[in-house]
Image (cartoon, rainbow, N blue to C red):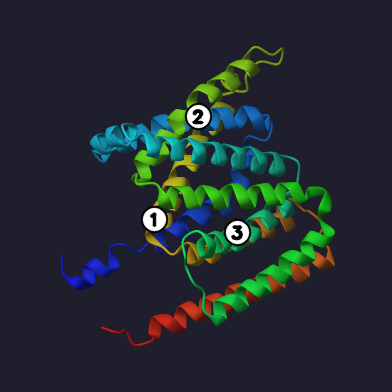
Amino acid sequence: MNPQEEEKAPSGLPAAIAAYLIWGFLPLYLILVQTVPAFEFVGWRIIWTLPICLVIVALRKQGPDLRAALADRQSLAILTASATLIAVNWLVYIWAVQNHHLFAASLGYYINPLVNVLLGTLVLGERLNRRQWCAVALAAAGVALLLGGALTTLWISLTLAFSFGTYGLLRKRVAVGSLPGLTIESAILLLPASGIALYYALQPGGSSFGNDLWLSLAIVFGGVVTAVPLLLFAIAARRMDYSTMGFIQFLAPTIVFILGLTVFDEPLQPVQLACFVLIWAALAVFLYDLWSRSRAPKVV
């Protein structure tokens, strides 16, 4: 492989963009399973994610990597923590969409890049330049506007932001490949997920799975929309600066924000519109900085 190919190989940008596009349009998929209680759906989501991961592991011949990760106690401890965080994130997000709190969910993922910047600078020792700090200030101002007018749903936003921000940090630091790590996370959550599915099956209303063909297929598809973007995200988290990846994440909440206005018909308050403008200004500044640095002469 020549030097140019080596330079291009580790780029995590395409994986990050693809992951955030899928997450941005996820509320449209959740319409298909809106009759399934959020807690039960999280259980089924985990149950169907594991076999999909195992199939991909087999196709990519990563069985030895998976076994090596399972033998590493430190990695298992970190993956147990990350699995817990992502399960909490799923539950809160699904509940928020089902209860028509898309703006609160969108706000959570607008705050998340600020959490990423905080973790990247304090934990990983990453540094931001002046334009990047300007972008952070603009985004923080926009978030501050919404915090003043969304106190009743603030717990949704903060839980989503900090659970996913910490999840990404743990996955960046654990010495396990993207796919084996996600497979182990799913396996760790399988027992409680099965317990949740069994609990609902024993209720008078019965399980949401198995009664209606199309609903059952939609539930199974939850494994795909879980495994694919998380795998892409894990790849990006290991290949990109954490603070840079955080700003790319603005793509997903912007899509969710627009879906809230259009498909879900949530009312837009003036303070929310002001926040939207400030955060897009922050993204414009950050992207301009990335573009400027990419055109600057490289020091050999």
Foreground pick, 213 / 249: 249
| Quadrant location of the N terminus in the rendered image | bottom left
Q: Determine which quarter of the picture holds residue 256.
A: bottom right
Residue at image location 52% in from the left, 47% down from the top: 167
Q: Is residue 85 above or below residue 1?
A: above
Q: Which residue is mark 1?
A: 238
Task: Give me the C-alpha separation between circle 1 and circle 3.
Answer: 17 Å
Report x, y in % for residue 58. 27, 34
Disc 3 crowd rating (10 Å Cα; few below 14, some 14-19, many 20+) is: many
Q: Is residue 31 above or below residue 20?
A: above
Report x, y in % for residue 37. 68, 29
Q: Earlier in the sequence, mark 2 or mark 1?
A: 2
Report x, y in % for residue 177. 33, 45
Q: Nearer the viewer, mark 3 or mark 2?
A: 3
Q: Which residue is mark 2?
A: 189
The disc label shown at residue 115, or none = 3
Residue at the far left in the pictured view:
1
Q: Secondary structure at mark 1?
A: helix
